[in-house]
Image (cartoon, helix red, strand yellow):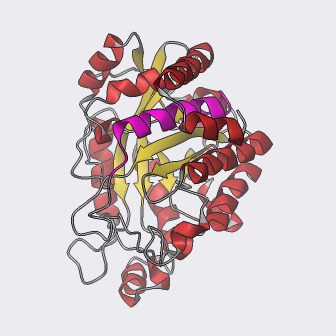
Amino acid sequence: MTGAEAWSHGAADVDERAVLRERACDIRDRYWGRAVSYSRKVFIPLTTMCRNTCGYCTFVKHPDQPGANFMTPDQILAVAAEGERLGCKEALFSLGERPERRYVEARQALARLGHVSTVDYLVEACKLVLANTSLVPHVNAGTLSREEVMRLREVCGSMGMMLENVSRRLTKPGMAHHACPDKAPLIRLRTIEVAGELGVPFTTGILIGIGETWQERIDSLLAINELHARFGHVQEVIVQNFRAKPGTAMADWQEPSRDDMLKTLAVARVALDPSISLQAPPNLEQSFEDYLDCGINDWGGISPVTADHINPERAWPAVAELARRTERCGYRLVERLTVYPAHLETAPLHHRLAGLARADGLVRDQLVT
């Protein structure tokens, strides 16, 4: 699908949107079949401090706010062990970006832990999980240098970072990414590019409803697709809808409509290479099964242990409920690893992952409870 075609679909009438959804579902069914996947994970928020100040974020805490911290090794292992006990296979590390470059308190906290940078500590944290549990880390560390990606690929199965949007306009005063040095689109695109050069299975995506235009949304999807065409490493794209949160700069912003989300998902499925998994979070929409009518094939990470720390007010559905609602739509829920089957043989930590997988690359011992 060209950018012009995607734009026209954005302005399409109801009948044309129905045709678009049918096309999206046909692409999904032909490539992914009747299985919709999820990853059973535990969420490890390594640090809640960050040098960026996004207009919609409640995850990040300034040093003088309650909850501003770095997790200790004991805390990390306690969460990981509980996840392992409940059948999780993925340890999702999510964290603020480079708080030590902004806050002396972050530098002091890292020094007490024996490190000078957040990435250094992240590497140690992944090693702890690998040495003491059967979980495989997936790292969401934001923008990274080539050397940092090389270090992290040795201790994780896959990596991720939301592109969010390629528009530089969103970094201007009053916009969602103002005062966010790590949200510069070129820097984020370069991180995805480096991951491709180094053969790291990568998750990225767009955040809709943060002030972008429809064309900027399409441009973001096409930029991701172009990088995948070069390297073949983008294993999944997330389309996530903005949710306004009290206490943030964007608390009064209008959220994207349900129709807008459905339209974006269908266009994403048509615009992206079929080999890229399309994911939408089920906890941000009450009638999330409608996403299946727009071509998605994955629900993302679901945790039986930890909350969605990015959207703590939105609880994940129970896996059994997710399975029931997926099956009512004619699909079956399957559990995958943090690395999709197509990337398993070439992924970092291949031998570790292979021990958890059955012949088709999905999780050996399927859990839908």
Q: Which residues are magenta?
A: 255-276
Q: Nearer the viewer, residue 94 or 152?
A: 94
Q: Is residue 123 part of the magenta span, yes or no?
A: no
Residue 145 in the figure: left or right of residue 120: right
Using the image as rendered, state which of residue 17 and residue 118 is in the foreground. 17
Main SS, magenta region, reads helix
Count of labels in the image? 0
Q: Is residue 350 visible?
A: no
* Quadrant of res 323: top left
Residue at 67% x, 65% y is: 186
The image quadrant where one finds the C terminus is top left
Q: Is residue 273 magenta?
A: yes
Query: From this viewpoint, which residue is outermost toward the bottom?
Result: 104
Left or right position of 253 against 292:
left
- Please report the residue visible at 24 percent of the width from the left and 53 percent of the height from the top: 312
Q: Is residue 236 visible?
A: yes
Report x, y in % for residue 210. 43, 58
The picture places residue 318, in percent across and down from the top left corner, at: 24, 30
As drawn, which residue projects farthest toward the right? 230
User: Which of 59/364 is in front?
Assistant: 59
Percent across and percent down for residue 327 are 34, 13
Residue 235 position in % (x across, y down): 61, 37
